[in-house]
Image (spheres, grey):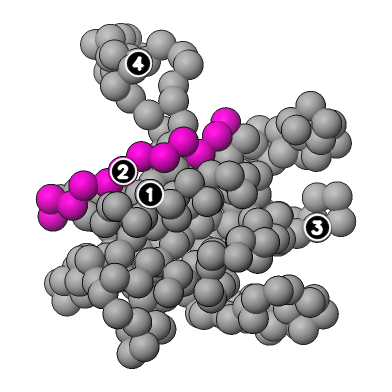
Amino acid sequence: MIYSFILLAGCASRMQLETPKQFIKVNDKYIFEYSLETFDGNEQIDEIYLVVDKSHLTFLGDFLNSKNYKHKIKIIEGGSSRQESVYKSLKTIESFSVSDDIVVFHDACRPLLEQKALKNILQEMQYNDGCSAFTTMEDSVCMKNDENFITKSLKRAEIVKLQTPQAFKFGIIFKAHEEESKVGNFSFTDDTSLLINRGVKIKLVEGGKFNFKITTFDDLFMFYKLMEDWWIAY
């Protein structure tokens, strides 16, 4: 079984918006709809869950009732952090999942996920315990100090930017989250870092330059422009 979870519980604190960015409409679609349609269009996926904050549960339920997706979309109330939301997602399927089932997590604010990238990740999960989408660095990379002076040049070829989707074997990721929850540690912002600390190898799969996360106003503006000039992107 393959379970996918689209994470919508973020509050857009960095942008200080009244409406969380995943619920902003662009070209008459909410931002979260774009990636949801990509997952819904994948025939390998068995179940899709939307993980959302408490204040948007009713809204999301009404939204789904007005749509006709191929999958039956289910809703989970998220937590106060990304890690807690992931853990609550895993707990939801704990009673009927087996260790080798695959769980896939994706940020709702990465609307331009391509079906090809999602399929490649699911393909690689046949041979790996964990996979993450990524993209390469084109710019030169360095480290700096507090005064904004360069302290060290880094090898660009050895550095990548992690993206989602990220996929894992259920048994491995659930055990890791269980152990962290027992000590009250919900500080991980990325599931790969949680697993790497436990010696799990994570396979990198090309995600694509357009699979960026809308985090700042510049990102939101870029997404607006890409949708306006969609023929450039595709």
The three-letter code of the residue at mark 4 reads Arg
Q: Earlier in the sequence, mark 1 or mark 2?
A: 1
Q: Is residue 202 shown in magenta?
A: yes
The image's mark for residue 170 is none
Depth check, mark 4 against mark 2: the one in front is 2
Q: Residue at x 29, y 21 (%)?
A: 158
Q: Earlier in the sequence, mark 3 or mark 1?
A: 3
The image's mark for residue 156 is 4
The three-letter code of the residue at mark 1 reads Glu
Q: Quick one: 210 or 18, which is closer to the camera?
A: 210
Return the residue at label 3.
Answer: 29
Q: Earlier in the sequence, mark 3 or mark 4?
A: 3
The image's mark for residue 203 is 2
> Which residue appears farthest toward the bottom when viewing the image?
95
Q: Residue at x 80, y 76 (%)?
A: 67
Quadrant where the image shows the N terminus:
bottom left
> Which element carries disc 2, helix, strand or loop?
strand
Q: Earlier in the sequence, mark 4 or mark 1?
A: 1
The three-letter code of the residue at mark 2 reads Lys
Q: Residue at x 39, y 83 (%)?
A: 93
Residue 105 vertical position relative to residue 134 in the rendered view, above or below = below
The image's mark for residue 124 is 1
